[in-house]
Amino acid sequence: MKITDISAQEVLDSRGNPTVECSVVLENGIKASAIVPSGASTGTYEAVELRDGDSDRYLGKGVLKAVENVNTKIAEVVVGMDVESQREIDQAMIALDGTTNKSNLGANAILSVSMACVRAASLSKGIPLYEYIATLFGNSTDEYEMPVPMVNVLNGGRHASGASDIQEYMFMPVGASNIQEAVRWGSECFHHLGNILKDMGFVTTVGDEGGYAPALGSNEKPLELMVQAIEKANFKVGEDMCIGIDVAANEFFKDGKYELSADGKSLSTEALCEMYEGWVERYPLILIEDGFGEDDWDGFKLFESKLGERIMNVGDDLYVTNIERLERGIKEEATNSILIKLNQIGSVTETIDVIKRASGVGMKCMVSHRSGETEDTFIADFVVGAGTGFIKTGSMSRSERVGKYNRLMRIERELG
Ligand code: PGA
Ligand code: ZN
């Protein structure tokens, strides 16, 4: 079905910053839109999120240039194309941009069109979004794997000032038999954790991704309290419910040292790795994301050689959903898992290629939101269509997070 019109506009993300929404209209009258998210602890090697830099509007964070790029340059190329030729649409935009990091048109501009086309195509075909995405992957549409959610209940780092250095502490309901159960378990543990914090006299205000953000004065304490919450909720620690963390270590890597201010420690790569080893011994910790800085390949490799058999060693800022960085990771055996963020690379097709390459060599792929999210629940359908088995979409609070869980539960009910 032919694309007859595309247009973009500025809307707000969950932090109140502008982002790009794109609407696509087809020849048959079908209209669909999509909104792109935005990160805070972004990796240096991510595709460029185009911002206006005009300090008179939104403190320089406006996205009118990206909007204009969709409305003029991109529209000129994409209008008239077949909405079902996703790869051609994405390739046309990449060629039009002409840079390796999408700095010309903006990854936010390109991705908004890419996602809106996927949604419009699914509506035009009269099939659910996850089903259409499964066909883009070449996956079966008879059977779907629902993901294990990574429920971020304690926020720190760039997502909550004054809390832990480590950015995210996540419950992982690995023993749940379906999404409804996984969501309930996650919610129950989240609320028990809240009560524990309250009883201890800590605040229960939440950070950017809806997790609590108390100043516990330690990066290890959260793990202890999470185990207590799992027990309080009557789940088997390490069997029903496990824990994952996103260290986002790049954010506190200064002059060759990892500066853990909550612990008053300055650690070398080796010492940080030892700290993680201790935690893996003492807690039901099954996943560590960005345990090291984005250029500390040796750190990831050391960790992989020591703990890669036991836990998921995930690269986020390390790979930025970029196939070239992934190839290096595969070659050097840096990690066994990769975080997937559509806006780190800036198109649906390139994201699919990265997932296929990573899963092709047995790496686990976690589809992820950004800390600046929106009401768009695209990634819930995306993870089901992709069948990667894990989704990271924040806490059991704040509607831009919960919306994805609600969409997953609806998909599961629809599939029976
Ligand atoms: P970001 O954080 O969206 O702020 O980059 C998420 C993450 O690091 O996984
Ligand atoms: Zn991360």
Image (cartoon, rainbow, N blue to C red):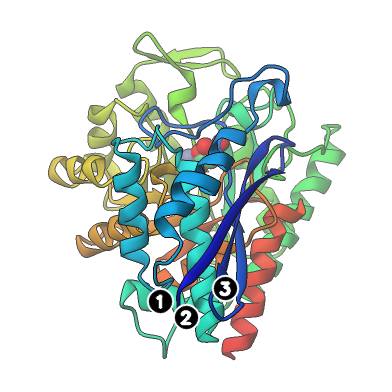
| Residue in front for this viewpoint, 191 or 358 | 358
Q: CA distance from mark 2 to mark 3?
A: 24 Å
Residue 48 or residue 288, whichever sits in front? 48
Q: Residue furthest left?
A: 331
Say the numbered circle drawn on residue 174: none
Asked which secondary structure carries label 3, the reply is: loop
**Residue 131: image tag:** 2
Q: Amino acid at mark 1?
A: Ala
| Residue 13 percent coordinates (x, y) | 69, 43
| 3D distance between C-alphas at marks 1 and 3 | 24 Å
User: Does the closest atom of ligand 1 sit within 8 Å of the Cβ of label 3?
Assistant: no
Mark 1 neighbour class, 10 Å CA radius: few under 14, some 14 to 19, many 20 or more: many
Q: Which mark is residue 134?
A: 1
Q: CA distance from mark 2 to mark 1?
A: 5 Å
| Label 2 near ligand 1 (CB < 8 Å) | no
**Sequence-earlier tag: 1 or 3:** 1
For marks 2 and 3, the one nearer the N-term is 2
Image point (61%, 41%), residue name = 371
The reply to whether callout 2 and callout 1 are in contact (CB within 8 Å) is yes
* Residue lying at 25% horizontally and 30% vertically, measured from the top left: 297
Q: Determine which residue is flagged by label 3.
A: 176
**Residue 165 versus residue 318 in the image, above or below:** above
Q: Residue at x 55, y 50 (%)?
A: 369
Task: Check the picture and name the quadrant holding the N terminus.
Answer: bottom left
Image label count: 3
